[in-house]
Amino acid sequence: MKTAAMLLRVSTEQQDLESQRNDLLPVANSLGYNVPEEYIFGQKITGRDNIKKEDRKSIKELKEACKDGNIQAIFIWEVSRLSRNSIAGRQFVADFNEMKIPIYFKDRGIWTLDPVTKVEDSNTKTIVGLYFDFAESELKTFKNRSLRGRKQNAKNGLVTGGFIRYGYKKDPETKRYVIDEQEADFVRDLYTKYATGEYSIRRLTIYANSTDNPTRYKKSSSKGSFKSKSGIVKATSSIIWTTQVIRGILADNSYTGTRIFKDVAGNIPAIITEDLFNEVQEKLKQNPTKIEKSKHTHLLQKIMFCGNCGALYYGSYKDRSNAYLCSEYTRTARNCNNTSLNYERAESIIWDYIKNQTYFFKQISEEEKDKLINQQMIKKDELISIKHNYENLIQKEELKVKNLLNLVKNSNGAFSMSDIVNDKTEIDNNIKTYNNELIRINEDIDLIDNRINHLNNQNLTEQALKNIESDRKLMKEKIKETIDKIVVYKLDNYIALLQVYYLEKAVNLLYFYRKKVDRYYFVKDEVATFNKPNDAKMLDLPIKLPDFSVTSSNNEVFNGEVFGEYTGLQMINILEKYKQYKDYAKFDKIIPEIIK
């Protein structure tokens, strides 16, 4: 007898895989096939297949078994047992046809290929396709009927199945929603705290994880582990509250007593008042994710980078001192060993330089103003051109989507679904990438427009300056408008270097961070260019490159004297000699409010 495989599938726990097996075995034997136990593949699965994700487990195992060449036919109880998805069913048949393995459907008494010649008949192909269409249609009818019943239950305030919202449980007798008092108290606590405005979503999530209120899954699950979306197996005990879940609770109108299922509203017990819910929704609209942990605005956040590893610097508060730190500095996986910056000193140096050395507050000549505006306009035109290119690329990708859809409609199944899915995924990824670039470009264009507007309206009064300095959020806005980025390096003898980039220029700001004198030194990058300390190592050079080398031997800054290569300390001594420094007023120490 020839060797065959068997594919079984049931949709409910009440249905039995064993009965399908017992009914199919005699049929296979009568047609001259033996079905070994290891070639019987069964699975309980509800609904229809989604081949955009992946084949279901039993199909994958069957395909893998067919690769050894021993299986000469496949027996299935009925067409819908292979798939209730019209496209997926056709694709599965095409996959096995390509392997020259015929499928026999018992309910229709039909082969997908001639079992002897292994040739596909066009009429049979059409008929099998229609059976898949019928299977999908039956599934839709069943779902619609089921949905009507669930809608009626929802209208009557009954549980409709599926996940029950946190704070509620099901009354086993009436089948209605009732309040779980312990969970409901926690929901009220979250709403009340968030309404005060003292909590961001992140802070509220941290608070939630500090309480004794477990998540619903952790509370009710009897399983010791679960598989995450990324495929990683995690212990159930590790489940914690996340910002996404907390935000979902805060935005759920059901807690006011009205549950919406599809397009039907039903009454359930209320946990919070409508006034409290509306107050929380107003807070959510204010984008609370940008509320900083300390309620304090870090002026240099997101524009200051580490010169060693490229990571962002972030503001940190400690009992003894405040500091800006490289975000990789304290990680064991990657310690770049760059310097920390005294928080108040770094901010006051940058602010002083902006006020006294850049176009932002310093009055400039009309000639210089026109030059700067022209530079910005050229940069803006370049960005607009790039923007149009990305918009054209998105249109081309969207056209590819239309072509794919036409291919699916007109191919009558004669295509590789895996190729279609891969092409669509690639198109989606390209469109996402291009849209992200467009967002960045539009932000850069807005920044240029702000700079041009300021250059055309340089009329800040002393009072206007005081108003800006009294509002740290406004200060941060002006710093971002002026400076593109700041790159931080540690030099010899406790010297810190801040490379400031703005308006296509770069300037080096240096200071001793172990001396109490409030003074910084400055030199344009076109006069003295800083070489990274690790350049020699990266280029495999036998010697360490100097910290500085002067690019011009004839310049006004140093009276035309010739300069060569210097350490950081030597460079500071030169800048001291030629009075390229500024004494500044250091900001008062920030003492953050203690968060309770």
Image (spheres, helix red, strand yellow):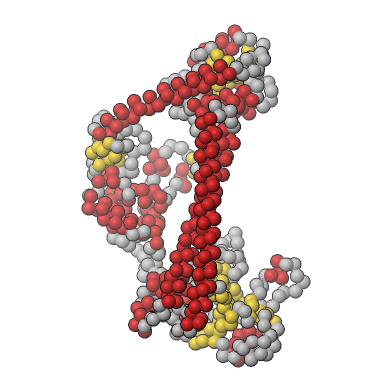
Q: Camera-side residue: 366 or 431? A: 366
Question: Picture coordinates of residue 406 (x, y %)?
Answer: 52, 34
Question: Picture coordinates of residue 52 (x, y %)?
Answer: 52, 36
Q: Is residue 200 left or right of residue 352?
A: left
* Residue located 51% across and 81% down the image: 368
Tell which residue pokes out farthest to the top in this image: 30
Q: Camera-side residue: 257 or 115? A: 115
Q: Which image quadrant is residue 137 in? A: top left
Question: Picture coordinates of residue 284 (x, y %)?
Answer: 33, 56
Q: Is residue 422 visible?
A: yes
How many discs appear? 0
* Residue located 70% across and 84% down the image: 564
* Residue located 40% across and 26% down the image: 140
Question: Picture coordinates of residue 128 (x, y %)?
Answer: 53, 19
Q: Which image quadrant is residue 232 in? A: top right
Q: Camera-side residue: 330 or 307? A: 307
Q: Which image quadrant is residue 544 in? A: bottom right
- Split into 4 quadrants, where in the image is the N terminus? top right
In the rendered view, tell whether residue 287 sits above or below residue 224: below
- Split into 4 quadrants, where in the image is the C terminus? bottom left
